[in-house]
Image (cartoon, rainbow, N blue to C red):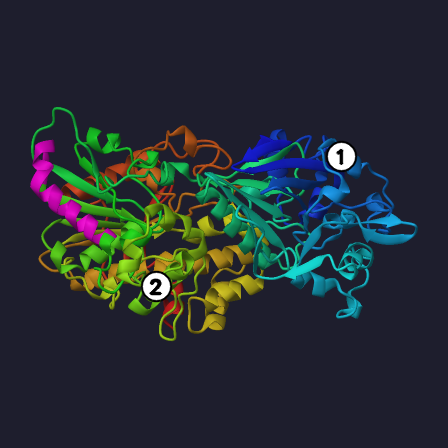
Amino acid sequence: MRDLHEITLGDVTVTRIEEMHGPIMPTGQFFPDLPEQAWKDHREMLVPDHLGTDDAMVHVAMQTWLLRSEGRTILIDTGVGNDKSRPSVAVWDHLELDYLGNLARAGVRPEDVDLVVNTHLHVDHVGWNTRLVDGVWVPTFPNATYLMPRADFERWNPATHPDIAGGVNENVFEDSVAPVHAAGQAVLWEDSHTIDANLRLEAAPGHTPGSSVITLASGSDRAVFVGDLLHTPLQIMEPGHNSCFCEDPAASRATRRKILGWAADHNALVLPAHLAGHSALEVQRDAFGLLNMSPFFGPGWIKGVDYLTVTVRAPEDAGPNLPVLVFVHGGGFTGGSTRAPLYDGRAFARNGVVLVTVNYRLGIPGFLHLPGAPDNRGLLDVIAALRWVRQNIGAFGGDPGNVTLCGQSAGAIIVGAVLAAAPATGLFRRAIVQSGSMEGAFTPEQAARTTHAAARALGIRPRLDAFAAVSDEQFVGIMPELAGLDLTTATHFDPLGGITPFSVVADRRPAHALSAGHGVDLLVGGNAEEGNLYLAPLGLMTASTPADVNATAARTHHAPAGLVTAYRARHPQATDGELRSAILGAALFGNGTRRLADAHAHAATSGARTYAYEFAWRSNALHGQLGAAHTMELPFVFHTTDLPQLHGPHALLGTGSPPADLARRMHAAWTSFARSGDPGWDPYDTGRRATMRIAQDWTLTHDPRAAERQAWHH
């Protein structure tokens, strides 16, 4: 965060004009579903600007952003105002503050202001729109145009909504909005509005129907003025939590994530309306909500054309013909890197395995479906890497005839697709699929929706020649606009539940076409609480409702009511968040994993074996809510549990230490499988469905998810 009073961004000067600052509401009242522990965990960052020294009261600022752009003087939001009757908020009732004096000290008189932007029409954003002169409310800034969102104007206009009186916005329309409109100075806008070459207004509904943000793009600088998307820095880390004033909670959460994602992808400064002291924030994508995911994602996008690379870690002074493990990273087909600290290969090398980690094309270059271009270009990169290994790994001591292809998450989906790809036949002897989904491929119809959305975002036609003319920087820049696409069609659910707009594209699901998988040993499994990763870091384990559970089921199953009933019967003590996670985890990973295991065990020939596992060790991160979430097994597979960035209340492994022997034993099982095709427990077949449950204790179970498996097939 930055202490900000004045800063220059490109050709725009930004100055903070504070009206007032102090306690506003108790933490639990202002943020009803934000855990009390979150305030305690970040107390040092929050006190005194954002939290009182008694840890009880939220502190906020009422302020205006003063911008000077293209020769004009612009105000964003105008605080509470003087002389206003505010019976619902005693601390704002009939104020007498020196706001105009603060403006004057910044060199601005009321008549100098050219434009006033109200991000929305709540009481604390429009107060200085007017002032009282001889008992009459008149516009404070006589030469200014006032930009107001039409949706909010109509929402609080008693002429159209006579029942709107009362509440925190009592009297606001009459004394701070209507007089400006009556004076002919108000412009009502909707959807978007260009202010000048540097500034643009964009609708950001949720907090109110007309809430908006202002994006700044000048030279190489980027910023976004987010109004009331944020009231505390905690919402950067826990974007799933709203204030009590957010009128549409679901839309507020979605908008907050979208705008923060845009800010992270564009290295944009975030300027909320109410943060004092450290009043501007810089957002990075090294976290997923409250969870630090930098060890998983690595350094992010690195510009350049030399990206189809492999990293090889081999034992020193080892003999020839060592087993080879080729690892394909995850990251939703849009992120990840061989440079991620999690994938350090020293433990494999110490144990006599040559580790090869693969970079492959991501996002639009790697997986956008384009007529005239080959599909699944990122997958083709992995097959090319396997060919490189076949030709070159002997120089590193590896045996080209004893190669295991391993992937996690998106990488596991790729591995599953490679199992179904005839061109990959003979390039590997074994495969490991960690938390993938063999039902995770998009149909061409689903993939085409992403193509058309990307074309719209870029302002081009959805054709190969048009995309070929677009830079990688532009591809990266539109990624936030592709988030949350609805890829459900008349015949297919979105197999990845909206978590990514990209996947392998195939007419047939890989689980039903194991061309290259015949004769290949398979180790396949997932984590016991996969869905927790997509809920706990965003505060949704506690914020989820029965409606959220039903909506998750409806996005993934043809008979959602029956599915929810089955899950509630199997987990009678589960919270709504836990049920939502269980259904989400099964839809994203569990079902496809079980179907791959069944298909491989049924089709395996030439003595090929299938082995299954479920990783169940629970992390205490995020107040104990993270549990055995997606990605949790990775530090144990790579024996990298000692990485400092994996430890802490907001790190993957939480506080304390995992069981001392768990990483050694799990790493040894993966090493044994790469060497001999046997991880150390009974093979899987479609009768017993033997599955090793991996936690502090290891337990061989039989068909451990039978009831859930049956519920999904009904």
Q: Is residue 88 above or below residue 548?
A: above
In the picture as drawn, the residue positioned furthest to the top comes out as 317
Give the percent coordinates (x, y) of residue 341: 34, 33
Percent position (x, y) of residue 368? 30, 58
Q: What residue does disc 2 label?
A: 461
**For the point 84% across and 51% down, which residue is it?**
86
Q: Nearer the viewer, residue 270 or 315?
A: 270
Q: Is residue 316 magenta?
A: no
- Magenta span of residues: 378-399
User: How many circles with numbers are drawn on the protein?
Assistant: 2
* Callout 1: SS: helix
Local packing at callout 2 (Cα closer than 10 Å; few below 14, some 14-19, many 20+) is some
Q: Is residue 622 left or right of residue 396?
A: right
Q: Main secondary structure of the magenta part?
A: helix
Q: Please say whether residue 442 is visible from this viewpoint.
A: yes
The image position of residue 703, as x and y in percent, is 32, 59
Q: Amino acid at mark 2?
A: Arg
- Name, please, the residue furthest toward the right: 134
